[in-house]
Image (cartoon, rainbow, N blue to C red):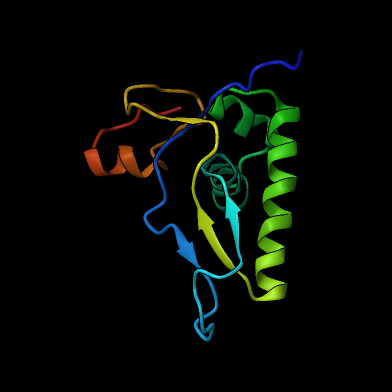
Amino acid sequence: MPRPVKCRKVCCLPESSRFGPLDLKSPDEGYIRLTVDEYETIRLIDLQGFTQEECAEQMKVGRTTVQSIYVDARRKLADCLVNGKNLRIEGGHYRICGGKERSRHCTGGCRRHKRSGEKWPER
């Protein structure tokens, strides 16, 4: 019996959840599904510059789990870019950050924390 999937902590849902080429005749035909936890992994590693270890700590999962999620997410993004497919961000095993949790890696880069105007302690 496989282990149950552990929920991954994400700071917030993306502001836009659909992306793709502008010249497609049918925007709902043939799309790639990127899960919210895959989106969060891309955001943390590629945009925020976290290491896989820091990302794992932030998302409350193991580093090997982050590595697997990251590889899948990058493959999906490459498929969209190279083959001109639509991308939808939806689903996955995640829970939204409540805005009260602090970790040594959450420095206010989370849009949820930025909107609240909450001050973060200096490290």
Q: Is residue 30 above or below residue 102?
A: below
Q: What is the x, y in percent for residue 116?
A: 23, 38
Left or right side of 100 for 54: right
Which quadrant of the structure image shows residue 11?
Answer: top left
Q: Decide which of 44, 65 is in the foreground and name it.
A: 65
Q: Please state, as top left, top right, bottom left or bottom right, where the N terminus lies in the image.
A: top right
Q: Decide which of 85, 30 is in the foreground and name it.
A: 30
Q: Decide which of 83, 102 is in the foreground and name it.
A: 83
Q: What is the x, y in percent for residue 42?
A: 60, 49
Q: What is the x, y in percent for residue 52?
A: 69, 36
Q: Residue furthest top?
A: 1
Q: Residue furthest left?
A: 116
At 49% from the left and 82% from the top, the residue drawn is 22
At 35% from the left and 45% from the top, the residue drawn is 111
At 28% from the left and 33% from the top, the residue drawn is 119
Q: Decide which of 5, 48 is in the foreground and name it.
A: 5
Q: Is residue 45 above or below residue 65?
A: below
At 44% from the left and 57% from the top, the residue drawn is 17
Q: Is residue 120 above or below residue 32?
A: above
The count of marks equals 0
Left or right side of 24 for 81: right
Which quadrant of the structure image shows residue 55?
Answer: top right
Q: What is the x, y in percent for residue 26?
A: 51, 78
